[in-house]
Image (cartoon, rainbow, N blue to C red):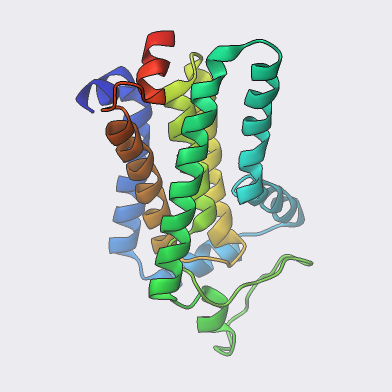
Amino acid sequence: MLKILRNHRAFFILFFLWLIILACLQIAFSPTEMTFWVNRHHSPSLDTFFWLITLLGEDGFWLIPLLVYLYQYFSGKKDVKNKAIMLIIIWITKGIISVGLKNIFNLPRPMEVYENSGRAIHLVRGLEIHHWQSFPSGHTFTGFAFACFFMLVARNNALGFLWLGLAMLIGYSRVYLFQHFPRDVFAGSILSVAVVLGIMLIVGRTSRSPLKQLRKEE
C-alpha cells in the first residue's frame, strides 16, 4: 500500500487536498449555506456544462472502458484482460457498497428538505430531481473510483489526473444540480478511493491475481 502511495504521490496529494478543502468548508459553513451558495451561482451555460459532466458519473459509463478493453483483447492485445477484470471487480464492489449505504441511511436529498422552505431553488429544466437516498453520492463514488483505477493501471498517468479533475467536477455538479449535499460528495470521494485501494490490496495478495499480473506487465 505504501508503495502505491509513493509511486502516485502527486495524485494522492491532490486528492487529499480536495478532501481537506471539503472538510474545512463543512466545518466553517452549514449544509444549507454551502448547498444554496453553489445552487445560487448558476447560468444557462453552467446548467448545460454540469448536466453533461454529471453524466460521467452514471453507472453505464463504466461500460465504455470495459468495451474498449474487450475490443483490444479480441484484437490481439491480451494484456488488457487483467485490467478488464479489475475494472469489473471494482464496478461490482462499488455498486454494492453505494446502493447498500443509500438504502441503510436513506437520508433526504436537498429537494426533500427545502422544497417547502420558501427559498429560491434553481433547477435545470428536464432533469429529474430525486428526494431520498442522498448518502453517499453515487456519481461522485463512480468518478473518483474511475480516477483511482486509471491512475493505478494506466501507463500514462495523465489519464488518472484527467479523471481526478473530472471527478471533482462531478462532485460539484451533484450539489449544483441540487441532487446532493456536500457531505454526500465528501463521503463518495473517500469511499471510492478506499474501495479501489482495498481491492488492489486484497486481490493483489493472491499469486494469480489480476493486480500481480498488471504489475508484471508494467
- Judged from this view, the residue extending furthest toward the left is 2
Of residues 107 and 68, the one drawn nearer to the viewer in this rendering: 68
- Judged from this view, the residue extending furthest toward the front is 208
Q: In the drawing, does residue 152 fall left or right of residue 6?
A: right
Q: In the drawing, does residue 193 fall left or right of residue 109?
A: left
Residue 169 in percent (x, y) is at 55, 45
Residue 162 in percent (x, y) is at 54, 28
Of residues 141 and 65, the one drawn nearer to the viewer in this rendering: 65
Q: In the drawing, does residue 10 fall left or right of residue 41?
A: left
Up-down relation of residue 194 to residue 217 (above or below): below
Marks counted in the figure total 0
Which residue lies at the image location 26% right of the left edge and 28% below the top edge? 205
Up-down relation of residue 150 to residue 73 (above or below): below
Residue 14 in percent (x, y) is at 37, 33
Up-down relation of residue 14 to residue 138 (above or below): above
- Looking at the rendered image, the quarter that the C terminus falls into is top left
Up-down relation of residue 95 to residue 75 (above or below): below
